[in-house]
Image (spheres, grey):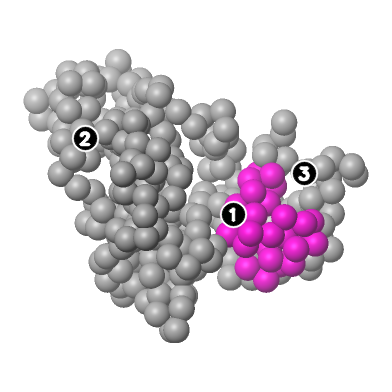
Amino acid sequence: MSKKKLLINEVFEQAKRESDKTSKNGLAMYLKVHLETFKLFLDEKTFSRYYDSFVTGIKNETNPDPDTLDKLSQYIGYKNFADFSRTFVKREEEANKTTVKISVDHDEESLTEKLSKIIINITNEQHFKIPEFIKKNGLGIMEMALLLVFVTSGVVFPNTKSNSQSTESSFTLPFIGKSHQDKKYMYWNGERYIATDSSSLGPQLEVIPMNEQPFKYLKLITRPDTLTVENALHKVWYSKSNNEVEFFTSFGKHPENGKALKDATEYIIETYGGQ
């Protein structure tokens, strides 16, 4: 599958998640309106043609211009189309992979220079990035302990010179625990989903069947003042009701009113988040 086809399929998949629309025309209209915030001005007929060409394949593939490809890549969280083509990981195929990137400074010897960008793929973990604001809002003691165990016992770093000044490690880890695996239900406690069993069923709690995606990743951001365009754009979702905005760490539906969460735009972050 070509990178253009992968990109446009991902664009329509994200539109489905954000809008709860499933028809070609509904998705095309949503993208037409929503992508104007990315300074991409295409009519719904163009998005319908993209759908026919790249999603269903009933028409020959068209050739979007480079600026359009860059804007579509930005919509799903990449810097541009080149960044998407280089780093995209298909959700269904790589759902159980964690990526660890290790960088060392450029003053190392030639062998170390060759190792300046090490990618370690660790299976059986969900692929999910931890932005800075999530560390300030949702990372609890258990998650921090898991992170410490992973760093101290799971990765061996190459030796470098004693005068090395810049070593960077960026970890892509899930908020994961095993205690919930034998519990088939969950409930929202106001900030995150809590795993439970059938003993909690009753009128006192709104208990729903366990769903791994929101259980692991959907949390209320309790410190919206920490959000900036730099650390939150295309990484947080929001819900607005009675002129009040709540930010969340994943896409999906609002745990209390069931409305689809929307991708937080630059305007929303600047208006209702931090400055």
| Left or right of residue 112, residue 41 in this image | right
Nearer the viewer's eye, disc 2 or disc 1?
1
Label 3: few (<14), some (14–19) or many (≥20) C-alpha neighbours in 10 Å? many
Element class at badge 1: helix
Task: Tell me if residue 241 can be seen.
Answer: yes
Query: Residue 127 falls in which quadrant of the image?
Result: top left
Give the residue at mark 2: 147
Q: Is residue 47 visible?
A: no
Q: Disc 2, disc 1: CB below 8 Å?
A: no
- Looking at the rendered structure, the kind of residue marked 3 is Val
Asked which secondary structure carries label 3, the reply is helix
Amino acid type shown at disc 1: Arg
Q: Marks 1 and 3: CB-CB under 8 Å?
A: no
Q: Which mark is residue 55?
A: 3
The residue positioned 72% from the left and 60% from the top of the image is: 27
Mark 1 vs mark 3, CA separation in Å:
16 Å
Q: Nearer the viewer, residue 169 or 274?
A: 274
Disc on res. 17? 1
* Quadrant occupied by the C terminus: bottom left
Residue span colored magenta: 7-34
Name the residue furthest right: 59
The secondary structure making up most of the magenta span is helix
Q: Earlier in the sequence, mark 1 or mark 3?
A: 1
